[in-house]
Image (tube, coloured by chain):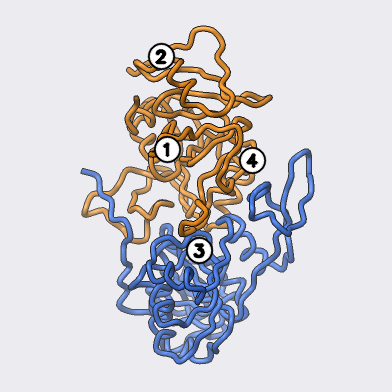
Amino acid sequence: MLTKDQIAQRIAKEVKNGQYINLGIGIPTLVANYIPANLEVVLQSENGLLGIGPFPTEDQIDPDLINAGKQTVTMAKGSALFNSAESFGMIRGGHVHLTILGAMEVSENGDIANWKIPGKMVKGMGGAMDLVASADNIIVAMQHCSRSGESKLLSECSLPITGIRCVKKIVTDLAVLEIAKEGGFILLERAPGISVEEIKSKTAGKLIIDGEIPEMVFE
Amino acid sequence: MIDKTVKNAFEAVADIPSNCMLMMGGFGLTGIPENCISAILEKDISGLTIVSNNAGVDDFGIGLLLKKRMVKKMISSYVGENAEFERQLLSGELEVDLIPQGTLAERVRAGGAGIPAFFTPAGVGTEVAEGKESREFDGKMYLLESWLKADFSIVKAWKGDTAGNLIFKGTARNFNPLMAAAGKICIAEVEELVEAGELNPNEIHTPGIYVQRIFQGSNYEKRIEQRTVSK
């Protein structure tokens, strides 16, 4: 099983040179630590910053400079600041190439649920609905199963959904999967030491297995 | 040049009545109008509807207004950081309208720009779409969302001049310029107030036409929610 950092590390391999990327809160934020140094990418923060830099040192902390998770950040070289309408304009307008976010459930047709659990305090969707409705390429980072052991890869989401038919790829602690155009989770890679059988038993939605499934490679 | 200056926060908010609609700039605790919130707290008003991306924390920002039961309804995108908020919501004392963040921003922008409604893909197929008109454009579905306007909008800028021109700093800009335009009366508090003509017109984010009152604030706490440092 992959650690959260390994999930982030595997997702970082999906990043391409020249991309503008929005990273969600949690595991997606960790992806920034694993983007190869030879790639030039720009991280977008939907509260109004293109070019998120590393976290500040104590001396650099500026309360007027935070990311969408409300953490203090710095600005990378060449960054730009803008208002919230402009920020979501660039998201809805398709200018952000890649969105990486967490999820509570993903369905086999690419629906995602990650904002609300009935009966629990509803905190709100923030920018998640705008992001998933707009990005061309959405990768989900999550655990394969919930804490109680239930599969989070379903034929249909049981929780209130955040967006429909939008997820392209999922990286879990067990596997890398792609959403098939006609529906279903195509198994692309296994986590080291995890069998196809185990992934099959922990995937409630339709799993598509085509030939030998390679293990993930970590450099 | 029309002089927009008022003496202080108390004068700026003096005529805000009960049961009105207020917009407040800020994302989290960044770029919130701290001085005006403190001044409103001294007033004897209630039944406010507040449009703000977040609802502050228990002892800072809009959380203070909630604690004093001055708020009837919040229109926000994310409200998670506030125990008193949760209590009032669960007991039915507080109404909440949760709106996707980009839709909230665009509704406020539309309100200030005279656009009554627009189509957006955010929320299609979700409970946000319930009761809303949807339409297909180029093979994709979109929801009709309407503008948001307010009786008063309260914003916080880094620098401003007596003509009401504003410059923001860092990510403290967020919703502030949008809300400035969407309030019938916009109150701007600034860290540094200068005479008209002293700011570079090329660097103005919010032109003074949107701002009716401006004052230099003081004692900014600028509380940080998630102090995160690199080792």
* Label 2 to label 4: alpha-carbon separation: 30 Å
Q: Judge depth for marks 2 and 1 and give the one in front.
A: 1
Q: For numbered disc 3, what is the local secondary structure?
A: loop
Residue A37, quarter of the rendered image: top left
* Residue at x 50%, y 77% (from the top left corner): B93
Label of residue A164 in the image: 4
Whichever of labels 2 and 1 marks the residue nearer the N terminus, that label is 1
Q: Judge depth for marks 3 and 2 and give the one in front.
A: 2
Question: A1 and A203: which one is in front?
Answer: A203
* Residue at x 34%, y 49% (from the top left corner): A74
Chain of the residue where label 4 is placed in the rendered structure: A
* Label 3 to label 1: alpha-carbon separation: 30 Å
Would you name the residue on which mark 1 appears?
A: A146
Q: Are marks 3 and 4 in contact (CB under 8 Å)?
A: no
* Label 3 to label 2: alpha-carbon separation: 43 Å
Q: Which amino acid does label 3 sit on?
A: Asn
Q: Are marks 2 and 4 in contact (CB under 8 Å)?
A: no
From the viewer's perspective, tell me whether residue B85 is left or right of residue B111: left
Q: Look at the picture and state if B66 lies above or below A21.
A: below
Q: For numbered disc 1, what is the local secondary structure?
A: loop
